[in-house]
Image: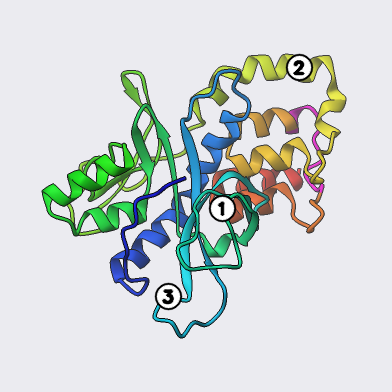
Amino acid sequence: MSEPIFMFDDDDPAMRKANEAAQGSFKYFWRELSWERRRIIPGLDMAMVKLPFTDGPRTDGHSDFEQMWIGEVGFDGETLTGELLNSPNWLTSVRQGDSVQVPFAQLTDWMMTVDGRAYGGFTVNAMRAKMGRNERKQHDKAWGLDFGDPTETQIEIERGKKSFGGFVSSLFGGRSKQNSQPVGFSDHPMCVNMMEVIEEQLQADRETVRTVNDEGFTLLHCDALAGNFGVVKLLVKYGADIAARTPSGRTASNLARGIGWSEIADYLDTQSNV
């Protein structure tokens, strides 16, 4: 990936706010990506996260950390994995194409694109907000993407005429046109549309709920982390083990609460006491 280079100050308050907003809204990125991997026809053009990499302390004038994007993103509730998309400008410990893993706490941004429209990209918009109109236009042209208003970062994809999206707004001093987060919990449209098919599959083979993938996750673990409330309820209905733990010792409720799906975590906690 040949990304245009636009430098920024890691200590910039606006950039810190962008990092916090990216971490706080990451659950929507992960939910979209979880459904993307179930689609026969891809819906996303690109999905990636930005992470800091370092060789250690430097004395050559460069920052200790270089922020770069990774694709083929994996997430287990604690660690992000993927493939480095950028070619480092000054680091030597990593190279473009390397497989990497970094704690989620170090996430600085996420972005996904559909039909030339960018979703997420909080740090990108933090930089764009400080640019003049012409500079911003050149920036967007270099990326080949529509980032929209730099004071409003869209976090969920608009589908058809109805928007299922929400905005994180006023991060950089702009006025909010919509709520800073989607109001209330609502399942992903694909979750809603697939409920009948998923229940038919569970009825045909009830042992499906007990299967464990190569990472040691049950379906309940995966869908709780992905924020698929409807699927979670079906899995519990058909006998999923609410107390099952991942190799690192986390339950489905732990995973849901950790990423921010408190509604799902509360439901699972209630069910475990039934």
Q: Do the residues labelled 3 and 1 touch (CB within 8 Å)?
A: no
* Inter-mark Cα distance, 2 to 3: 52 Å
Q: Name the residue under label 3.
A: 63
Nearer to me, 176 or 107: 107
Q: Give the range drawn in magenta.
A: 236-244
Q: In which quarter of the image is residue 211?
A: top right
Can residue 171 be seen at all in this image of the molecule? no
Residue 84 within the segment the image draws in magenta: no
Nearer to me, 105 or 4: 4
Q: Name the residue under label 1.
A: 96
What kind of residue is marked 1?
Gln
Kind of element beneath mark 2: helix
Measured as percent of width and height from the top left, residue 116 is found at 34, 31
- Mark 2 crowd level (few <14, some 14–19, many ≥20, 10 Å Cα): few
Mark nearer the N terminus (2 vs 3): 3
Image point (19%, 49%), residue name: 136
Mark nearer the N terminus (3 vs 1): 3
- Mark 3 crowd level (few <14, some 14–19, many ≥20, 10 Å Cα): some
Does residue 3 appear left or right of residue 140 in this picture?
Answer: right
Q: Name the residue under label 2.
A: 201
